[in-house]
Amino acid sequence: MQAVMDIPADPALMPAGDDGQLSLPPVDDLKALRGQLAALARGEWPASLDADLVPLVARLQNAEAGRTLTQQVLRQLAACNLDLGEVPEDAEPALAAGFKTGFGNLSEAIRQARGFAVAIAEETPQIAEKNQALSVQSQRQADAVTKLGERAANLISALAEAGKQLQELGRLAAEADQRATSGRAAAATLGRVMKDVRDRATSITGVIEVIDSVAFQTNILSINAAIEAARAGDAGRSFSVVAKEIRMLASRAATAAKDVRALIGETQDAVKQGAQTAEATSVELHELGSLAERTSKAMASVSESMTMQSSEAQAIETALVEVANLSQSNLAHAEEIREGTKVLSTQSEMLGDCVKLFQLPENPLSEPAHAEALDVAQWAAQEIGRVLEEAVAQGDISEDDLFAREYSPIANTDPLKHNAIFTPLCDEVLPAIQESVLDENPWAVFAITANVDGYVPTHNRKFSQPLTGNREKDLAGNRARRIFSDRVGRTVGAHTDPYRLQIYRRDTGEIMFDISVPIYFGERHWGGFRIGYRLG
């Protein structure tokens, strides 16, 4: 081994004496220093250490701790083990915090992916089953629609035939009306003829009366002539014969007149009945004609209605054809969904196998930051439930209004903001709780309340800056009155799990942990309290 004194010395690095002259440490000290350096070069830590080497050793120890931590991280990553465990106490704080944050973010992201993979794997068979049921139902619907289409076509044909028959009936009714009109005219003519016959029979009766009177006078005259002939004796015998014949003629004339009178009386009775019958026939024919006319109009109306129904039936048939086509299309889509579900099931299994490669911490709350955030969120959720119950009890708001889910957009806001009927109450009672969480827990980025729709009526003061009209500034600076619809925002108030821990990238670009706890109004779920924070 070369002696220490043989090492060339740099005068600039050598200590100077009191007189300004360069001086060397004692040879024994140089030998001890060289031995310590040699031990350090071999990776050994000397039992005693020169004071000048303390800073160098401290740096070497930090580098060794960082190398040890890096090796630990590499071993765990190679084994897909995301449970970082304990970090060496002498590791550089920034390096340790970086690894801890990275492992924490990655492990929770993988945990969520695993949960999603499990949920997809559980839902996929149900989707496939429901899709199969939908396919069967769609086939039945298609068959039913096809049958309805056939029946609609038959109905259209039947309506067309019925329309033709109604038109024919209408034509017959119109013809009956015309004939009834002609019958009324004939009945009226018959009535007039009957009246004329009756009038003439009356005139004939007068003539018969004259004939009867003449026969009576003739009979009287023949009687007188017979008396005079008897008085004349033989001279009047021939006159007596003439008188007898005249009497017999008068008698026959009287008898004939009587018979004619009787016949005329019967004729008058018959004519009277005929006139009455003709009048009644005229009335009946009039009513029949009126009925035939109404029937004709009714049939025309029915025919028109049936024509309209036929048009409607044709429209229904067209619609049924479209529905049948849609049903067939649905069947095709159902088949595509079935194939897609198979692919999704396979991919979810592959995703599950992939995330199973990673070994995660059994309990995410083993991370102190998560456990602390959960304790704070549980306390805040209970406090908010209490103040909401007090507000309703005091009449500050009704329970219905507190649970209202109608939102009024606020004009000229981007991102869009909304007002709700319970927003003023939240502005009044929530800040005291939300701000105290931030004041007492500097690690918390935000602490807010959301209802079941993800609506945040009142945000933290530092995120409630005056609106500027600049979207980028307002997106980060004023986050109140918003309905958050991102993956995390829409679930924090909707879930009823004891807690839900999620990691996500905010719309501002930051990677954030979010822990949320349900808020209850008595036994009724109102929303959730959420805290955003980072590890490290």
Image: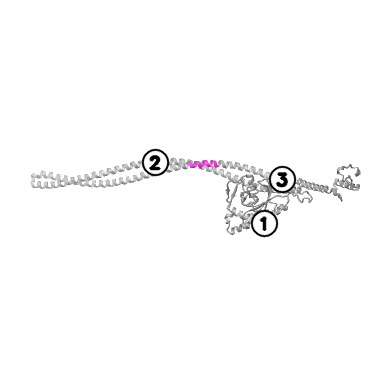
Amino acid carrying mark 2 in the image = Leu
What secondary structure is the stretch in magenta mostly built from?
helix
Give the residue displayed 61% in from the left and 43% down from the top: 334
Quick check: is 312 in the magenta stretch? yes
Q: N-terminal of the two: label 2 or label 1?
A: 2
Q: Where residue 407 appears, x then y in whole percent?
A: 58, 50
Q: Where residue 57 appears, x then y in whole percent?
A: 83, 48
Q: CA distance from mark 3 to mark 2?
A: 86 Å
Q: CA distance from mark 1 to mark 3?
A: 37 Å
Looking at this view, name the residue that lies furthest to the front: 19
Q: N-terminal of the two: label 1 or label 3?
A: 3
Amino acid carrying mark 3 in the image = Cys
Which residues are drawn in magenta? 311-323
Q: Which mark is residue 255?
A: none
Q: Which mark is residue 379?
A: 1
Other residues around mark 3 within 10 Å, as few (<14) / some (14–19) / many (≥20)? some
Tag 1's secondary structure?
helix
Q: Would you identify the image quadrant in which residue 339 lies?
A: top right
Give the residue displayed 29% in from the left and 44% down from the top: 191
Residue matched to label 2: 172
Residue matched to label 3: 354
Residue 391 can be seen, yes or no = yes
Name the front one of labels 3 and 2. Answer: 3
Amino acid carrying mark 1 in the image = Trp
Residue 88 lies left or right of residue 227; in this view the side is right
